[in-house]
Amino acid sequence: MKRLLLPFSLLAVLVTWTVIAADPAKPAPLKVLMVTGGCCHDYENQKMILAEGLSARANVEFTVVHEEGPEGKKDKTHRISIYEKDDWAKGYDLVLHNECFGGIEDVAFVERIAKAHRDGVPAVMLHCSTHSYRAAKTDEWRKCIGQTSMSHEKNRDLLVKNVAPEHPVMKGFPAEWLDAKDELYKNEKLWENFVPLAKAYGEETKKDHFLIWVNTYGNAKVFGTTMGHNNSTMEDPVFLDLVARGLLWATGKLGEDGKPAAGYGPVQK
């Protein structure tokens, strides 16, 4: 594992996980950029859980950009440094967003993030990424995600119901799964290309909300789930299997049977 401190006066850590295939004929790993950090979550440990858990399930190589605020303080208004460049996603097969910066209001900044996906870079959206950039007066990030959500219910056990068992991403996911101690994000608007995959009942709103889905945004395929507030959810094999399938689906490497395409399953060390 290589760790580099980026030259900024804030906490900025770039980490690369590389898994070397034993079979030289195996396809090169998918290059995945994970962007993480921000308010309210244990991103220090979650980046490890996701990178290691997904690398054990798919032929992927992660580059991780983890930033907080000045002096490492969790800041909802911090601007991830790589997003300042127009070509911030260049060279990656997919971007995994696991960030929480809901206080950013700069429309141009937010639309620059979304544009990389609209132009064709696939995405995985996890948990608070759905609430990120919600203060900005633009819908482009919300269109990219596939839904508008501005709040969530209290932290409690969620009974997740699979509503699309024939979709490749949901093959292998239980008909019902207990997601212990998580937050149910409220669906306020579902954009036109949103495809629901699973739901849970809102005790406060008295209606169902979709918490697993896929979306198409411009030329990009997007997989999303609002689950994952706690590390216990993220490290659960059911959750990691789900996200691995979502990642492979978004990059076109998941078969209709829900299995990785040849060469894109787990790499033997």
Image (spheres, rainbow, N blue to C red):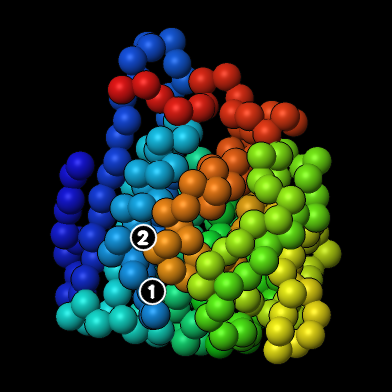
Q: Which mark is residue 46?
A: 2
Of the residues shown, which amino acid type is indicated by label 2? Answer: Gln
Would you place residue 183 above or below residue 123 in this image?
below
Which residue is located at x 68 percent, y 48 percent? 174
- Tell me where residue 9 sits by quadrant: bottom left
Image quadrant containing the N terminus: top left
Residue 217: % across, % down = 70, 57
Q: Are marks 1 and 2 in contact (CB under 8 Å)?
A: yes
Which residue is located at x 53 percent, y 67 percent? 180
Residue 148: % across, % down = 69, 77
Relative depth, front residue between 173 and 113:
173
| Nearer-N-terminus badge (1/2) | 1
User: In 3D space, how far apart are the residues under numbered discs 1 and 2 (Cα atoms)?
Assistant: 8 Å
Residue 95: % across, % down = 49, 52
The answer to whether residue 179 is visible is yes
Which residue is located at x 23 percent, y 60 percent? 13
Circle 1 residues within 10 Å: few <14, some 14–19, many ≥20 = many
Residue linked to disc 1: 41
Q: In the visual, does 120 lie left or right of 19?
A: right
Circle 2 residues within 10 Å: few <14, some 14–19, many ≥20 = many
- Tell me where residue 146 sits by quadrant: bottom right
